[in-house]
Amino acid sequence: MARRRSKRPGITARFIISFLIIAITPLLIATYISYTKSREVLEEEAAKGLLSVADYKAFRIEMFVSEKLKTAENLAHTSDVIMAVERLDEALESAGGDSELYRSIDKEYKPLFIYYQKSLDFEAIRLINTKGKIILSTAGAPRRRTLYEMVLFEESEMTDAFISVKENLKTEISDFEYGESPGKGRLYINTPIFKGAQLIGVASFEMGNAGLFEYAGDHRGLGKTGETIIASEKDGNIILITPTRFEPEAAFSKDFEISEGGLESLKKAVKGDEGMGSFTDYRGEPALSVRRNIPDFRWGIVVKMDTREIYSSAANLRNTLIMISIGLIFIVVIVAVAMAGSISRPIKDLTRVSSTISGGDLGARADITTVDEIGDLAESFNAMTAKLIEAKSNVETKNSEIEEQKRLLEKANKELDSFVYTASHDLRAPLRGISSFATFLEEDYRDKLDDEGKDFLRQIREGTRHMNDLIEDLLKLSRISRIKNPYEKTDTRSLVDSVIDRIAYDVKEKSVDLRIERGFPEIVCDKIKLGEVFLNLINNAVKFSSKTDGKPVVEVGYIDESDNHKFFVRDNGIGIDPKYHDQVFGLFKRLHNESEFEGTGAGLSIVKRIIDDHGGNIWIESKAGEGATFYFTIPKGLSGEIGQG
Amino acid sequence: MGREAFDGKGPREGRAMNILLVDDSETDIRITMRAFMKSKIKNRIFTVTNGQAALDFLNNEGNYTNAEEYPKPDIILLDIKMPGMDGFQVLESVKKNLELSSIPIIMLTSSKAEEDVARSFKYGASSFIQKPVDFDEFVKLVEKFNYYWYIINQLPDRDL
């Protein structure tokens, strides 16, 4: 039985898979490594870029504002300003805010301050007295109320700054506050005005957020998605001082949504937590941001760029490599298929040729001429086929020889047949003559014969009877070999029973205790011949056990063996000396003479012949005087065909 | 077998059977005759020693033209192995002949070969008996034979 072939993918598939693995794996690893590495590098570079932009801008903004501060301070020290404050304040005190005096002085100085405001690029300049009253404003008529009073009605950074300046006696810059229109914010640079060592007032310079726009709006070094956000805190909230690159309305807008991440970043920046990080911005895009803080003004600067832009070249690299991989897969598959083909094609060819040959056409040859291992295989295959043809013709020769021998054997058998036939016919006839004439003599010449004469005649008749039996047995023996019955299923128990019926008379006459054991099987054998075997053996057992002291006992039984059916016939008679155990199966071999036991001695050789024909064994276990057991086996698994032999 | 069967009277009212014995062996003829002689039923036995003579006898030809001297037998006892025409040829010939085909032919022969038995019946023999070697056995056989063919079996009347 051929071993089960385990299922495996074909040569082509294995080639493709292996090649792909060999080619693609390093490429994938390289892609992955280069992608991650390039992202790192890009991130580093971007961070550096952002940092430098942030630092630069922070610096510039600081410079810008400091400039403004300085300008404000310088102006506050000019005599014009001091004198203006003095005179206005005095006029206010003496004459009041509505007086002619006051108005004329105001009218006198206003153009100057307007000039200053415009040339120094402020939104407005205000002079405030120590009591908190705005005594001059380029932004419109001075308010009647004092700053202090204004606090009650509205919040103002200006007021906070004023108070702070009055206390600290140095220039202060306020936080941004919302301007009149959306997108506009303003702060105040308040600086003390001294006359000598005494504070006489505070100059407040209003500055809008527009001046910072150029810093925020300068996107140099920030690619396509980078931007600068400048923000500060107002009432606990983050407000943007400048519009963003993508949201022009974002500045000072209460409606503008900043993402959680963005808020975090700006909060940190405003609080002075400088650093770098990634977050999702207000557009929903992931971005890398650098935080800077301008401590003097409590402003936070966030310079950010979309990570997508940062990593874009890495992504490009990765995509390029993937395209290359795909291209490579095609190439590899093609090469693999080609390679596999170069091996599997000759193998398939060889397979085809070999199945043609096993189909019977021995002329087929493998047509492979490459000078490699496969070529060698094909060569030896072809050589083998040639040998096969040779062997086949040898076999055919042998077969015809065997046929010839079979014919001769047939012929010999036929000759034996006719010999046996002749023997039975021709040998018997004279035998009949001898026997009959002896009888006639005995009958007709009874008076003239004495006892001895009568005895001679009796002997003659005995002799002829014996010879007849011998002829009969010879006939039987030859018939055993010639006439084969097909094997059939046989109930051995009923076979034994029928045999016992045939010898029932003897059994009864000799008072033999015949015991048949249970458990006789149904077996496949030549039923008639097996019957002969049992008949012979049981008959012998009955015959020999009866000449014993005590009750003659014959047992017939069955033993189941793994490969064989084993039967036995046992008697408690005179036994057989072990040295004769083989000989008793010889033809006409007798251990006793006619007077002790009748029989020709052919029975056992017939039995042995039958057992041999079945492929079984027969043997004896016995000692002289201790009875005998005849064992014989019939192999299991015989099929219902005519037996060999 | 009852005693009454052996008083010489039977359905044939005193006339025993005419039997034609065909056998080439003088010895066998002698033995057979003696065996029949020993029987209570005394049949009339004619003997020929070869097949051709048998046919002549049956057809009243050759040496046997006298039909009174050589009547048609009631039974033919036929041996197989004979020189010249063997038993089977005689058998075939007789069975082909409409005048003779009703005569029961009994193969009385040394052989016990199955082929011979089969062939005999195939050609129309009525019985196949193997000649025993022992004479006493032969005598017993003849008794049974007579009992069957003379007493039990109804033979057609030859005289009609």
Image (cartoon, coloured by chain):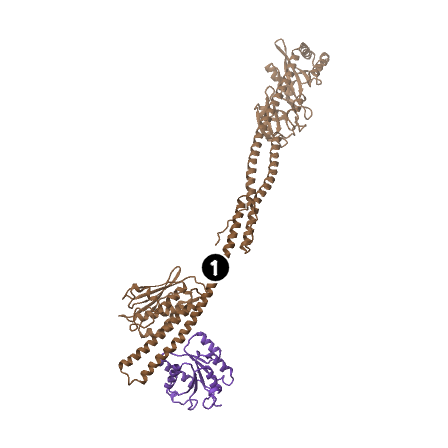
Chain colours: A brown, B purple
Q: Is residue A169 above or below residue B40?
A: above
Left or right? Give the position of A403 relative to A63.
left
Q: Is residue A290 above or below residue B74?
A: above
* Nearer the observer, A365 or A167: A365
* Nearer the observer, A600 or A531: A600
Q: Quadrant of the C terminus of chain A?
A: bottom left
The residue that appears at 51% across and 83% down in the rendered structure is B97
Place of residue B160 in the rendered image (x, y in percent of width and height, measured from the top left): 49, 90
* Nearer the observer, A50 or B68: B68
Left or right? Give the position of A162 relative to A8.
right
Amino acid found under the numbered disc labelled 1: Lys
* Nearer the observer, A292 or A116: A292
The residue that appears at 33% across and 81% down in the rendered structure is A439
The chain under label 1 reads A
Place of residue A549 in the rendered image (x, y in percent of width and height, measured from the top left): 26, 70
Camera sees residue A286: no
Place of residue A275 in the rendered image (x, y in percent of width and height, measured from the top left): 57, 25
Q: Is residue A276 above or below residue A557?
A: above
Q: Is residue B141 above or below residue A186?
A: below
Q: Which residue is mark 1?
A: A398
**Rendering quarter of residue A504:** bottom left
Place of residue A249 in the rendered image (x, y in percent of width and height, measured from the top left): 68, 28
Camera sees residue A199: yes
